[in-house]
Image (spheres, coloured by chain):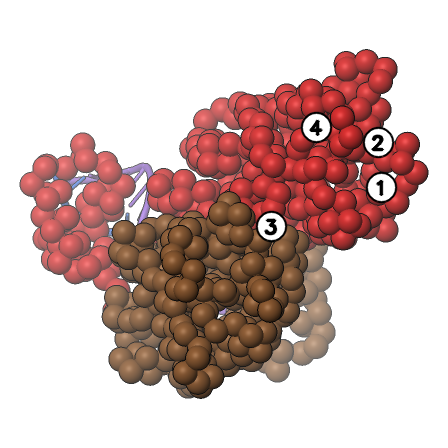
Chain colours: A red, B brown, C blue, D purple
Amino acid sequence: MAATIYQVAQAAGVSPSTVSNVLNGRDGRMLPQTRKRVLQAMDRLGYRPNRAARQLRTGRTRAIGLVVPSVANPFWGSFARHLEAAALERDHHVLLCNSERDPRREQDYVAELWADGLRGIVLCTSPTSLAHLADPIADGLALVAIDRTAQPDDPSSVTNISIDNVVGTRLAADHLLGLGHRRIGFVSGAVRTVNRAERHRGFLSALHAAGDEAEPIIWDSGDDYADLDAAELGRTATAELLARDPSERPTAVLAMNDMTALGVCAAAREAGVVPGRDLSVIGFDDIVLAGLTWPTLTTVRQPLERMATVAVEHVLRALDGEEPNGGSLLMRPELVVRESTGPVPGT
Amino acid sequence: MAATIYQVAQAAGVSPSTVSNVLNGRDGRMLPQTRKRVLQAMDRLGYRPNRAARQLRTGRTRAIGLVVPSVANPFWGSFARHLEAAALERDHHVLLCNSERDPRREQDYVAELWADGLRGIVLCTSPTSLAHLADPIADGLALVAIDRTAQPDDPSSVTNISIDNVVGTRLAADHLLGLGHRRIGFVSGAVRTVNRAERHRGFLSALHAAGDEAEPIIWDSGDDYADLDAAELGRTATAELLARDPSERPTAVLAMNDMTALGVCAAAREAGVVPGRDLSVIGFDDIVLAGLTWPTLTTVRQPLERMATVAVEHVLRALDGEEPNGGSLLMRPELVVRESTGPVPGT
DNA sequence: GTGAAAGCGCTAACAT
DNA sequence: ATGTTAGCGCTTTCAC
């Protein structure tokens, strides 16, 4: 059914190797007219190279793996779309993997992809340690980690791409402080990831810089809630925070991401507290929905598309055998002020 | 580096074909002890079959293609996650393709996947015609179309999976009629898809059945808005509908999906109209966010996970050469009543 | 500038 | 019950 290089070669009156050379852009090795004849033959026969054969021979695939916590989260959905577009641009496919942040699944997935000949992976689960992926990395896996910065024990070949969380939390905290808030909550999940830890630190230092009055209120889900999804986490946290004594109740909440922030807003409403008026809420990411909900969400935007483009560039560069730069790439986050934040109630 | 069946064979003291037989579950062809020895050798050597070689030989991949309009839409994000889980269960990978509903891109994608050896695709863009995919389908592509029902010109091998849109719109319309609404808007996009057309028809017939008083108000984006995303569409439509003369203004709106419904709510608020009180809004899908926004969204739920599971089953069955059933599989939608619908204002 | 030939790792006849 | 062998379609030395 499908044409092979032999048929193309025959149709063009050349040898298979010449066809192969045309296929691989080794133009210098043949006359322009020969090349043209081959091209025409390909066209006429509707020739499409067989990837499996190519890969078997060269050991390389034209696909990259994408490991996200879950594309059901709109943020990762958007990222996946941009990554796919960027990969397509470079003639690569994207293999989708939802790990739900389970290191075990992640490890299996990577081993699997590796065995399938994939040599480039974009990992979005920001694990604190990459130990579970040490083997393939040592064997030359081109790994780009999103939403994570380099850690002391990281293999040197891994490139990390993330927003600058210190700047991000600072933007958020200063916005809140500027509105007069002093008791500010920080809601995060039990699952330890690099960027959450950084945001946590950034938050504390921003409040600290604001002087003694500012009072951080950390809400951290116990291990009990490790499996809750982000929105549910915001909900649970808020229900608990709002039940506290007024003097210990935050007037503003910084959530680890927009889905959590949405959960915070929902729980506030359920408790009769109007988000954006009685309780200021701020998220991270700027998912599409942040501008559609009520109140619309003030949030720290991540330059998603650019991160995706850069991620693909880095993976492909590493795949081309170029010296890995390693380290971290910090992008500038941007504060998007909407309706969910406002002055302290009663002032 | 990676072990081959030859090395495993040598280590186990058998021939490569026996190893291959073990690999392919042809247990009957060897003694249990032989099998065991091979298994042990594999384990010891950390053997992983080479997919490329396998595929080159058999012509089959263990991957299925997923073509969605865009995973940036939370509904398709969730679907993608469930599909990936279901595929994994059956030892298959998922290749992600965002077509943005562009038939041209869709065609390119499918041709590309076909050339890569993929023989099974789950298509979620519900085009009215499958003409642009006629070639691969004729060549044996196992195609399962989601969110679409069989059309007269469809190739007979295509299986369609969808909710029953007649039931769905009926549920929605009856809910609205039961609340006393008579002027009910229907907001849909210019892009023609099978299920939108069906919902359109279902909506009209439901209102028709309610008698003369019920008055459908169709808002259909002109071609100008063909590229708007769903939420933006709801926004534009609502701004226009609410600007109409009170006697021609709908008191309730049925949106083509939840994202559009969210846009409707946002535009209503911007116009000083309180969704859920002054304007009832109902969507389709029941995305995760439908329970998080304010007002929480009344919607017609699609049994997403089940659709994904069934889709994978059908693709793999077709891939195994079983007679394709073709036709349509209609699943039962379910009305989820939340805050965005209520009695007609002023009654 | 072009061609011949070997072989990537696996499967499936076909032997034995 | 197990082994031998011939490719699947391509790339890549190495000849010419």
How crowded is the residue under tag 3: few (<14 C-alpha within 10 Å), some, or many (20+)? Answer: many
Chain of the residue displaying label 3? A
Closer mark to the observer between disc 2 and disc 3 = 2
Q: Please provide percent x and percent y for residue A65.
A: 52, 47
Q: Please provide percent x and percent y for residue A321.
A: 45, 30
Looking at the rendered structure, the secondary structure element under dot 3 is loop
Q: Please provide percent x and percent y for residue A266.
A: 71, 50
Chain of the residue displaying label 4? A
Q: Which mark is on residue A217?
A: 2
CA gap between label 2 and label 3 equals 26 Å
Marks 4/2 same chain: yes
Upstream in sequence: badge 4 or badge 3: 3
Discs 2, 1 touching: Cβ within 8 Å? yes
Q: Please provide percent x and percent y for residue B40.
A: 71, 62
Say what amino acid the circle numbered 4 marks.
Answer: Pro
Q: Which mark is on residue A146?
A: none
Q: Which mark is on residue A343?
A: 4
Which residue in the structure is indicated by mark 1? A241
Q: Residue at x 40, y 53 (%)?
A: B243
CA gap between label 4 and label 3 equals 30 Å
Which residue in the structure is indicated by mark 3? A73
